[in-house]
Amino acid sequence: MNFPLPNFGYNSVYKVFNGIDLRQTSLCPNKCVMCAKAQKGHQHQTMSMEDLHFVLDIFPDYKGGVWLLGSGEVFMLENLPERVAIIKNAWPECTVHTLTTFNIFHGQSWLAELFKAGLDDIYVSCYGYTEDDYHKIHGAPLFSGLMQNIEAIGKLQPEIGNKIHFKYLNEMEHLFGVRNADQKQKKFMETVARNHISHFEASDVFPWNKTIPPNGKSLWELPSPCSVVWGGTTASWIYILENLDVVPCCLFIEDDFVLGNLRKNSLEEIFTGEKFRFFYESWWAMRPDKIPVCNTCQAYSAFPSADELARMAAWQARELRGQKVIFWGGGEAYRAYKSFFVECEPVAILMDTPADAGQKYIDGIPVHHPDAFLPTLTEPLPLVIFAMQKASPRILQTLKEKYAYYKPSKLVICPANAQLRPRVEPFFQD
């Protein structure tokens, strides 16, 4: 079975799973502002031990990563160490990780047992650094539980602390209205570091009900890479909910878009089924608005890999094959991606400031200033904008202000990076 990606015959995700997102529970004491589940309500569902064993049998000799997550808080499960041990016993060469708010305290011995069972890492979602701020962001008065866990880690072997990774945000004041966020974060990190924890990693999350651009995308509605569809980053993952439903990615946390169920369907049925093809074909047509979760996703363009961008460039070029086009930009992005577009017929390269004032051609293509060339067109030709992420918004704004007749259907940004982060009003005010 071939994984039906549009370019280069990638191997089937069915054959090459290297990541399993294994949702353990939707139980949760929190109401985090960045969590869709918190806004809609939790279903209070936990994967049974029988179902856990069933999943393990589906993937014999699995050696990749396992993420024990939940649309809830996985630390609600007192038998979490037992679950980790069962997974490690079935898949001894896998790595087991979890993402948690780390605010449910079961005791120092329980934490020691968790790592003894084989847990490789804990990633801590922690975006409030005082009791008040924590309650605002995570929706629960559980800051004390977080601190108890941190102090307990400090009393275990120092190497245990090296397995804890704290996620933090750089825009707490802007996104969430937390005053003096940087100073509070610095003081908190100093406390955490005294307990043998030294890994701090920036995260990129948003208030779930923040202002969303039209159609949940940029104003221009241009293609941007979704790792699930275009890349090797998460395209080879499988996402399994607590009831063994399989969904496209971690943002699908309800039963509104299910690819299949492992109790009812084989992997081949799931990954050749109607829902699976609809998901991919919607993205290939750049119509994520057909899928409500995708239409409001603010994450899919945040961390594209070079592989994702190259594969998208190949798709963009294929869509324009044999057509007359205009290129905008002759710099780094042009040099990196121009070879994908060899089957197009470029009539001009637009440049605001040519490197050489007398430069009339690049690769045999006439060079023009946009303001001199675009007004001469009788109809807009497809326009390929070769620009990196800092430059593309400026070019889009120029088109919007001066040449509004250029609609999204006529624009291609290469590499695909057109997602513009909207201005967001603070979610809270102290």
Image (cartoon, grey):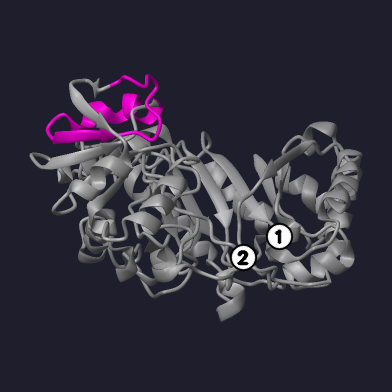
Q: Secondary structure at mark 2?
A: loop
Q: Nearer the viewer, residue 401 or 363?
A: 401
Residue at image location 67% in from the left, 48% down from the top: 123
Q: Which residue is mark 1?
A: 174
Q: Visible in this render: residue 244? A: no
Residue 374 colored in magenta in the image: no
- Residue 429, compared with residue 165, is above or below; it is below
Relative to 37, does residue 78 appear above or below in the rendering?
above
Dot 1 amino acid type:
His
With 24 as the anchor, is 255 left or right in this view? left
Magenta part of the protein: which range? 332-359
Residue toward you, 280 or 335:
335
In reply to whether residue 337 is colored magenta, the answer given is yes
Q: Which three-letter amino acid code belongs to the residue tagged 2?
A: Val
Residue at left offset 78%, top offset 63%: 104
Q: Answer whether labels 2 and 1 touch (C-beta < 8 Å).
A: yes
Q: Residues within 10 Å of mark 1 (few under 14, many from 20)?
A: some
| Tag 2 residue | 424
- Tag 1 secondary structure: helix
Q: For this view, does 220 lie left or right of residue 4?
A: right
Q: Earlier in the sequence, mark 2 or mark 1?
A: 1
Quadrant that contains the C terminus: bottom right
**Can you give x and y, in whole percent of width and height, for residue 131 in the image?**
88, 65
Left or right: 43 as drawn, with respect to 122: left
